[in-house]
Amino acid sequence: MKSPLAFPVAFPSHAGLPKTYFQACVMDPLRDCSIVLEQVYKDDGVPTKIDIYPGLPHAFWAMFPELEISQKRERDAAEGPRGY
């Protein structure tokens, strides 16, 4: 993929973007996309924070809202970039 519209990592620079918050689940097939993009942003000087949820699949909080980790993920999302 070469289009930065489809693949944000392809932009020549991300400098100047606002601080950005990422969440990734270890068992999510999209996990590496979040981890790589967070590192690219950080390398370009964008303040970032990433929370990684081990052993959990994509959208676990919607499937299992009663779990404490789901509630923590909701709190983390609400706090987002304010938390750093």
Image (cartoon, helix red, strand yellow):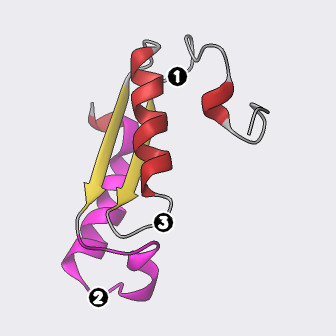
Find residue 63 and report its image quarter: bottom left
Say whether residue 59 is magenta: yes
Q: Which residue is drawn at the image coordinates 39% and 29% (left, top)? A: 39
Depth check, front residue: 9 or 61: 9
**Position above or below: 22 against 4:** below
x and y, in percent, of residue 45 in the image: 42, 12
Q: CA distance from mark 2 to mark 3?
A: 23 Å
Say whether residue 22 is magenta: no
Q: Is 69 placed left or right of 82 in the picture?
A: left
Asked if labels 1 and 3 touch by Cβ distance under 8 angstroms, the answer is: no
Q: Which residue is drawn at the image coordinates 55% and 11% (left, top)? A: 15
Q: Which residues are magenta?
A: 55-81
**Position above or below: 22 against 38:** below
x and y, in percent, of residue 73 in the image: 31, 64
**Residue 52: assigned label:** none
x and y, in percent, of residue 37 in the image: 49, 36
Secondary structure of the residue carrying tag 2 is loop
In the picture, the quarter occupied by the C terminus is top left
Please name the residue that numbered disc 1 is placed on.
18
Residue type at numbered disc 2: Glu
Residue type at numbered disc 1: Pro
Find residue 28 and report its image quarter: bottom left
Please name the residue that numbered disc 3 is placed on.
29
Please tell me which of labels 3 and 1 falls first in the chain.
1
Please name the residue that numbered disc 2 is placed on.
66
Which numbered mark, 2 or 3, is in the foreground of this view? Answer: 3
Secondary structure of the residue carrying tag 3 is loop
Please tell me which of labels 1 and 2 falls first in the chain.
1
